Image: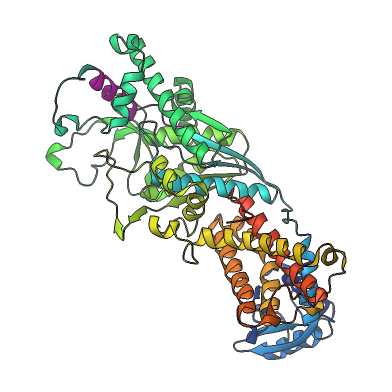
Amino acid sequence: MYFYENLKHTLFDILKLMNQQKILTNKDFEKKKFNVETSSNSDFGDISTNIAMVYWKDSVFDLYEFAEIVKEKLLKKSDIEMVEIKNPGFINIFLKKSFIQNQLKLVQINKIKKVNNKKKINIEYVSANPTGLMHVGHARGAVLGDSLANLLKSVGHDVVKEYYVNDAGKQIEFLKDTILFHKNNKKKKYKDDFLKNLYPGEYLKNISENISADLLANENLKNSEELKKNAVNYILKDIKKDLKAIGVHHDIFVSEKEISTDMQVKKIISILKKKKLVYEGFQDKPKGIDKKNWIKKKQLLFKSKLLNDDSDRALIKPNGDLTYFMSDIIYHGKKIEKKYDILINIWGKDHSGYVARLENAIKSAFNEDFKLKVKLTALVNLIKDNKVLKMSKRQGTYITLRDVLKEVGKDALRFMMISRSSDKVLDFDFDLIKSRNKDNPVFYVQYAHARCCSINKIANQLFEEKITKKELDFSLLNLPEEISLIKLLCLFNKNIELAVESYEPNKLTNYLYELSKNFHSYWSLGTLNSDKRILVEKNIKLSSARLGLVNGVKKIISQGLKILDISAPSSM
């Protein structure tokens, strides 16, 4: 058991003992939570806990008396060197160096800790409209969703990765109209403003050349639907190709058109009517529309105001088409029928105002016990030569995912897309990502793994087989940098746990960068002092112990990068 887990169990045992000794008067003390945090500053110990501040009011003692009792009981443990009480009541715990050194044995056989309560989880991500190639903004959601799915799987959850294909509605009509326009105007010149209701860009021009001629020649309804279907499938094939190139694979593709049947619509309306959540009425005038241009039309409305929304929302338009809101209720209803414990959606941040509305609607409509979590992704700024590249999907000038991938590669793209919290704007700097220094986080992490491999290769040349046959004596690892590295290695599983709990893969990338930075600093000690070299030719025992530490770093970086589907190169 790693040191922070060990201390948490020790502290909980102390609470149970205090309860038996009537020091704690609250019988439900187990329901309260106390923190056990690793200290970033060794002056404050290895572990800091707020246990006294949480529990002293449940005792007959004041805060500091209670803390002293905890301190006294902690000092009876053989692996604890010293305990300090600091304002306003924190308890700082210093572990014996021998205990920390021996923790490296656990690192060398590290297995990612599995959850006790396995969940069935559906994670829906990317779901880009099939009306053009994926751009770099889609890549952020794609990598976030895929990395999060990998994290959840790594701790034992049952995860289904889903793509919702928006193949119905007005945008698909525009797609059809755009393709027909290009097919019928090959040789004609036209002004950009003529295309204001069509999709811009060369990509759809090319598609119009590849769609079969008989579909384009015939204008009847059947062939119109066939044309839309063919266009969607053609674009979706390209989207899947781009996703595969960055290591993103979905288990299920769900068609909006296929699930939004008349029967499903009637089923949802019936459910909502029984709950008295819908009515025929007039929607409030949308903000930003002039009153003169606003025509009231009766339509089916959902009683969103009952659920703290500022307006009741339309489910079916006056012309009979479904709104996005209705389609989403149907879609989530389908997922709920499959008895998922948790539904995770990855959306762009521009949908932030929609999250509570949908969550309230589906929880009101369906009585099933489930959790909905929506992760929002902010914009990605592409930077080149210290300038932000201007993009406009409306003008057809956006930069595609495949263009970015061609320039930086899969590993850099995946790492950078989850290098910070998803709700923060991300600066994707091409020049930085191509650099080979510590400012480039993916290079720095991969180089740490490659350096570990290189040290092993040198060790085999220096010591041949001797170094692997020796019993590793980790008590020889006495440098402050070695102790810090061991403690940091022990926190890998904790960071996995935190990333899973918060649905934030960036906690893992940040950890891997911090570990790599510490390792590179440790390696550089030997350039200034030969006694601090990792491999000391005249001291096989010390070299073996240090190589054990190096291999601990190698193992943890390899495990972390594998979860993120990023390669761990043996040389660079």
Q: Is residue 184 above or below residue 454?
A: above
In the image, residue 168 lies in the stretch drawn in magenta: yes
Prevailing SS of the magenta stretch: helix
Residue 522 occupies quadrant = bottom right
Q: Is residue 494 above or below residue 306?
A: below
- Report x, y in % for residue 260: 45, 25
- Report x, y in % for residue 118: 70, 47
Query: Residue 542 vs residue 526: left or right?
Result: right
Residue 426 or residue 389, whichever sits in front: 389
Q: Which residues are magenta?
A: 165-183
Report if residue 247 is visible in the image.
yes
Report if residue 219 is visible in the image.
no
Quadrant location of the N terminus in the rendered image: bottom right
Q: How has the structure been colored for display?
A: rainbow
- Report x, y in % for residue 165: 45, 31
- Report x, y in % for residue 356: 43, 49
At x 48%, y 47%, the residue is 409
Quadrant location of the C terminus in the rendered image: bottom right
In the image, residue 137 lies in the stretch drawn in magenta: no
At x 27%, y 30%, the residue is 298
